[in-house]
Amino acid sequence: MSETLSGTDLNFLRRSIELSRQVRAAGKHPFAALVVDGDGNIVAEAGNDSLPPGGDPTRHAELVAAALAARRLTPEQLAQATLYSSAEPCAMCAGAIYWCGIGRVVYALSEHKLLGLTGDHPENPTFSLPCREVFARGQRRIAVTGPCLEDEAAAPHAGFWQQP
C-alpha cells in the first residue's frame, strides 16, 4: 500500500532514487539513502558499497548514512531526523537506524517488490523481515512511511539482477 507524502518528502525520496541510479552506474547494487535533519538539511548521503572486489557486505546505504549522521548530529537532532531510502531497510539496516536514534524512515521500494525484482540472485539474499517488524521490537518508536514511488524506485534495478 502506497502512502501520501509531502512535497518535501517526495523531493528527498526522489533524491535517494537518483542516488541509486548513480550507484548503479558506478557498478554497485542500486541502493541509496540520505539523512535529513529536522531543519530540512541533508546531513548524510550514501550508496550501497557491498559488491566485491573491495566491497563490504555490511556497507548498505542505509547503514552508512545512519552512521555518518550519528557522527554529525546530537542524539536530540537524530530523534528529529528522517532517513530516506530508495528501498525498504533490511533487518541489519533497521537495527543500525534504531541504534543511531533516527526518529523517522521514509522508503520507496518495498522489500516484497524488491524480492520480485531480484529473485534468488546470490548477490542479494534477503530476510523476509519488514523494517516495521524490527522497529516494533525496540523500546522506542520509529515512524515509518512507505512504500512510496515504487515504480520510480524499481527503475534503477531493471536488468541489474538477471543472471549472466
Image (cartoon, rainbow, N blue to C red):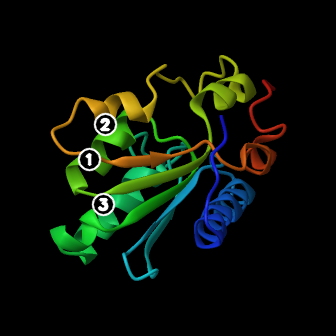
- Mark 1 or 2 closer to N-term? 1
Q: Position of residue 119 (x, y in %)?
A: 70, 19
Q: Amino acid at mark 1?
A: Tyr
Q: Amino acid at mark 3?
A: Ala
Q: Are marks 1 and 2 in contact (CB under 8 Å)?
A: yes
Name the residue tied to disc 2.
Answer: 135
Q: Residues within 10 Å of mark 1 (few under 14, many from 20)?
A: many
- Mark 3 or 2 closer to N-term? 3
- The C terminus, quarter of image: top right
Mark number, residue 98: 1
Q: Residue at left 81%, top 47%?
A: 155
Q: Residue at left 37%, top 76%?
A: 38
Q: CA distance from mark 1 to mark 2?
A: 7 Å
Q: Amino acid at mark 2?
A: Phe
- Mark 3 or 1 closer to N-term? 3
Q: Mark 3 falls on what kind of element?
A: helix
Name the residue tied to disc 3.
Answer: 67
Q: Position of residue 110 (x, y in %)?
A: 61, 35
Q: Position of residue 135 (x, y in %)?
A: 31, 36
Q: Residues within 10 Å of mark 3 (few under 14, many from 20)?
A: some
127 is higher (above) or lower (below) than 55 = above
Q: Residues within 10 Å of mark 2 (few under 14, many from 20)?
A: some
Horizontal side, residue 95 vs residue 54: left or right = left
Q: CA distance from mark 3 to mark 2?
A: 17 Å
Q: Position of residue 139 (x, y in %)?
A: 15, 39
